[in-house]
Image (cartoon, grey):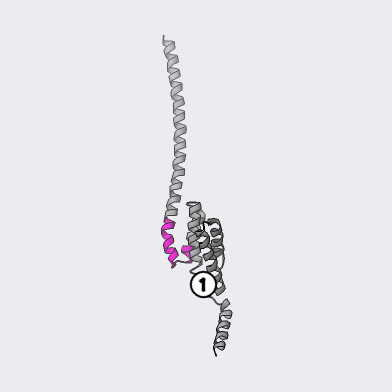
Amino acid sequence: MRSGVFIISLAALLGGGCATTGPGGGTFLDRYSGSRQLAQAETMLKEGDSHGAAHALEAVCNAPAVAGVTDEALFRLALLTLKSKPGSAQAQQLLKRLKKEYPGSQWTALAAPVADLANSLEEQRRQNRVLRGSNQALSREITELNQRLEQLKTLDQELEKKAR
């Protein structure tokens, strides 16, 4: 009797490999594979292998979407990207994708302040570029005014010599 239940359960599990676990949930195999890669990425992060973790997280993000796995991978990959390249467009795209594809996820809620900070950083960089350009223009103008001042001094000295 027990072996019959076991066989039926096994058949249901094997046959359910193509069934999804819900909207955006992916197949059972997708969920297992994604969870495994996510766990590997976490282990790599603990060991200090950010590069390897980023590759594992990218693989999860590029695989079929699995709620609870892909959203976490998107969040973690965005943080890793921000760590290596603060304010990067890639990190902002990952956070936007997370918000769009998983609006109800806990990772989306955690990502909101991170996205705000990344946007603020980008705005600060834009303002710095504008101010740097203004600073260069003012420096050129000061140089030009100093040259004119020297020319006026020279002219004044020549006029004094002629007046004597």
Looking at the picture, does residue 107 appear above or below residue 4?
above
Q: Residue drawn at (46%, 29%), measured in percent from left and top?
A: 143
Q: Residue drawn at (46%, 40%), measured in percent from left and top?
A: 132
Looking at the picture, does residue 148 appear above or below residue 5?
above
Camera-side residue of 112 and 45: 45
- Predominant secondary structure, magenta span: helix
Q: Quadrant of residue 106?
A: bottom left
1 in the magenta segment:
no
Camera-side residue of 81 and 1: 1
Give the x, y percent position of residue 94. 50, 59
Callout 1: SS = loop
**Quadrant in which the C terminus is drawn:** top left
Residue position for label 1:
25
Give the x, y percent position of residue 63. 57, 66
* Residue sticking out furthest to the top: 164
Looking at the picture, does residue 16 appear above or below residue 51?
below
How many numbered callouts? Answer: 1
Q: Residue drawn at (44%, 28%), measured in percent from left and top?
A: 145
**Quadrant in which the N terminus is drawn:** bottom right
110 in the magenta segment:
yes
> Which range is magenta?
97-116
Give the x, y percent position of residue 21. 51, 75
Give the x, y percent position of residue 12. 56, 82
